[in-house]
């Protein structure tokens, strides 16, 4: 009985191995099926070549304002989201500490100036000595530094208040509470909503196709069903480096929507630029073209079961169709696949 089972199991194993090998061969080489060829006629159509890139909403007039030195917030003239007027006071910090710091630095300046004068008097008998000259220079540099410190403290006093540089909206603020201690890095951001733009980065290999005034269509993710017709407003002269290579920032105007389509900073979307357009040109599907030795060919049906490859001259191309300048006629039947 055991001998029978062992012999039987060996037979099953051989069959399984054969099935596995057959499966591998089938998966690797496949079994060719009869695929019916599909033919079509060249057609006259309007061809457009577009360049599509992604980007987001920004603004031409955007200012990040901060205090030169930190301090206690004693006045808030606007809160986040409020409309502001040009030169409107946005915030002020306590000047008393700044005033004391300025007075302290003025005292330091006076002390250093007197020290310089006394040191020069003490060294006058050794004038011309290199060591004496170096010491005098060091004293002068120290005095210069105290002068700069006084000027910085004076600037901090004069910049104890922040003002809106233009009409706009206060889009971000570090706090809405008076009495908060602000640091020198805390920022108030003002944006003019009438200067909103769509900003995108165009690869350097495509930037030669872009020019100011060029027509484009922006589609924001937030308003996907509402494309915006616009044009190139500005092309940066300086490139930027990204993980994908060298790009050039390009700005597109966003027409003022009057509140019906409120743009927000950072809204994502994409823009399509019209690179070229031709009306009523003979064209074929891109998949019907075959390239060989730098030349383009299509397969033309010559009989019930016969075809021939014919060289064609290709003009404007996009992702779907190619213009045929010469080589075939509208009445020809060409192989698509």
Image (tube, rainbow, N blue to C red):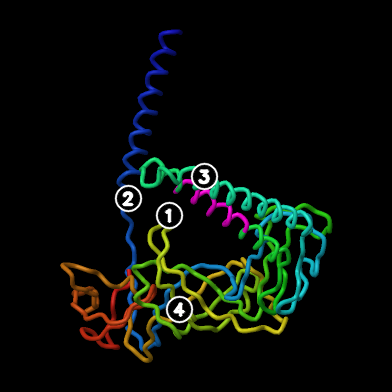
x and y percent of residue 274 in the render? 43, 81
Q: Earlier in the sequence, mark 4 or mark 1?
A: 1
- Mark 2–mark 4 distance (CA, rounded to whole Å): 45 Å
* Residue at x-position 46% and y-position 67%: 201
Q: Tell me which numbered mark, 1 or 2, is placed earlier along the sequence.
A: 2
Give the label, 1 or 2, closer to the camera.
1
Between discs 2 and 4, the one toward the N terminus: 2
Circles 3 and 2: CB atoms closer than 8 Å: no
- Return the x and y of residue 210 as percentages of the image width and height: 39, 78
Q: Say which residue appears at 37% left-offset and 21% top-offset.
A: 11
Q: Nearer the viewer, mark 2 or mark 4?
A: 4
Spatial CA span between label 3 and label 4: 72 Å
Magenta region includes residue 142: yes
**Secondary element at tag 4:** strand
Around disc 3, counting alpha carbons within 10 Å, would you say few (fewer than 14), some (14 to 19), or many (20 or more)?
A: some
Label 3 with label 1: CB-CB less than 8 Å: no
Q: CA distance from mark 3 to mark 2?
A: 100 Å
- Residue 236: image quadrant is bottom left
Residue tagged by mark 2? 31
Q: Quadrant of residue 164?
A: bottom right
The x, y position of residue 315, in whole percent, is 28, 82
Please provide the residue range marked out in magenta: 137-150
Q: Which residue is mark 4?
A: 273
Q: Furthest residue to the bottom? A: 280
59 left or right, relative to 298: right
Chain-order first, disc 3 or disc 2: 2
Q: CA distance from mark 4 to mark 1?
A: 23 Å
Mainly helix, strand or loop, the magenta region?
Answer: helix
Q: Which mark is residue 119?
A: 3
Between the residue at mark 1 and the residue at mark 2, the CA separation in whole angstroms equals: 43 Å
**Residue at the (45%, 78%) spot, across then down:** 273
């Amino acid at each position: 009985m055991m001998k029978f089972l062992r012999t039987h199991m060996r037979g099953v194993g051989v069959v399984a191995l054969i099935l596995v090998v057959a499966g591998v061969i089938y998966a690797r080489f496949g079994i060719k099926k009869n695929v019916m060829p599909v033919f079509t006629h060249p057609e006259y159509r309007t061809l457009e070549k577009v360049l599509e890139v992604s980007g987001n909403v920004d603004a031409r007039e955007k200012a990040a304002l901060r205090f030169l030195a930190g301090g206690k917030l004693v006045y808030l003239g606007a809160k986040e989201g409020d409309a502001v007027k040009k030169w409107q006071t946005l915030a002020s910090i306590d000047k008393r500490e700044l005033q004391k710091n300025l007075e302290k630095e003025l005292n330091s300046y006076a002390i250093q100036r007197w020290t310089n004068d006394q040191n020069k008097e003490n060294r006058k008998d050794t004038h011309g000595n290199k060591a004496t000259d170096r010491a005098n220079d060091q004293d002068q540099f120290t005095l210069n530094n105290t002068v700069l410190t006084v000027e910085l403290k004076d600037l901090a006093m004069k910049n104890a208040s922040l003002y809106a540089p233009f009409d706009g909206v206060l889009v971000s603020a570090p706090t809405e509470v008076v009495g908060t201690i602000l640091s020198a890095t805390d920022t108030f951001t003002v944006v003019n909503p009438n200067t909103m733009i769509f900003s995108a980065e165009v690869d350097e290999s495509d930037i030669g196709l872009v020019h100011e005034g060029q027509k484009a269509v922006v589609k924001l993710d937030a308003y996907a069903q509402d494309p915006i017709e616009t044009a190139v407003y500005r092309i940066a002269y300086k490139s930027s480096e990204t993980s994908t290579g060298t790009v050039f920032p390009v700005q597109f105007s966003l027409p003022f929507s009057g509140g019906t389509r409120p743009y927000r900073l950072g809204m994502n979307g994409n823009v399509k630029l019209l690179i070229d357009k031709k009306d009523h040109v003979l064209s074929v599907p891109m998949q019907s073209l075959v390239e060989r030795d730098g030349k383009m060919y299509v397969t033309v049906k010559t009989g019930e079961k016969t075809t021939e490859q014919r060289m064609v001259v290709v003009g404007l191309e996009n992702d779907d169709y190619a213009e045929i300048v010469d080589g075939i006629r509208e009445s020809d039947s060409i192989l698509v696949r």
